Amino acid sequence: MQTNTIFSVFVENLSELNEGNMVGCWVEFPCDYDEWKEVLAKIGNPEEIIITDIDNYTDLESLPINEYSSYSDIQELAEYIAYLQDDQYKEDLFTVYNFVANDFEEAKEAVEDGKYTLMQGYTMAEYSEMLAKECYTIPDELEPYIDWKGYADSLTVSGYTETSKGVLIEEY
């Protein structure tokens, strides 16, 4: 793996694959167009290719790459991820994409517009408890009887999503 590799994809010659032959190779992205042409030459300069596997070196749980993604789309994604310098922005983007957005472009737009805030390290129950304690004075003798998980469940209908990274809050 190169030090600047964001992810790798396994590219196969679709016509060969349809005939039962596996003719393909791994390509590390970002990948300049000359390297891409060399890859295509290695697999027989096919008219059609198919992406059959991905090695993901990012924090994204999944990448917006499918079996028919084009070189330009894959390269653009790799360049965009490499460009991201702000770790909080990247964390927010990946979390929005993995948990609430329908596609990567929607996630980028939502994060750029400040539509979501990620409260890292909290479960929904922990966040709901912290939120309630910031807003209200709760008597010590009453606290053991509060159902923080139940309160957290009611927050989910108000734009709060529990993720493996923390609580994602949709800003209105």
Image (cartoon, helix red, strand yellow):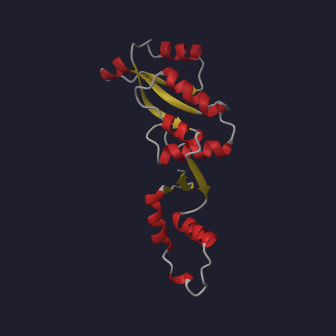
From what the image shows, is residue 147 above or below residue 67? below
Is 58 or 86 nearer to us in this picture?
Answer: 86
Is 27 or 63 nearer to us in this picture?
Answer: 63
Q: Identify the residue shown where x is 48% and y is 76%.
A: 147
* Number of disc labels: 0
Give coordinates of residue 63: x percent, y percent.
Answer: 50, 37
Q: Quadrant of residue 23?
A: top left
Residue furthest to the bottom: 141
Q: Identify the residue shown where x is 35% and y is 23%.
A: 17
Give coordinates of residue 153: x percent, y percent.
Answer: 44, 65
Q: Is residue 67 visible?
A: yes
Give coordinates of residue 172: x percent, y percent.
Answer: 52, 50
**2 left or right of 17 in image:** right
Is 15 or 75 nearer to us in this picture?
Answer: 75
Give coordinates of residue 24: x percent, y percent.
Answer: 45, 23
Q: Is residue 61 visible?
A: no
Q: Identify the residue shown where x is 54% and y is 83%.
A: 144
From what the image shows, is residue 153 above or below residue 120? below
Residue furthest to the left: 19
Quadrant housing the N terminus: top right
Q: Identify the residue shown where x is 48% and y is 70%.
A: 151
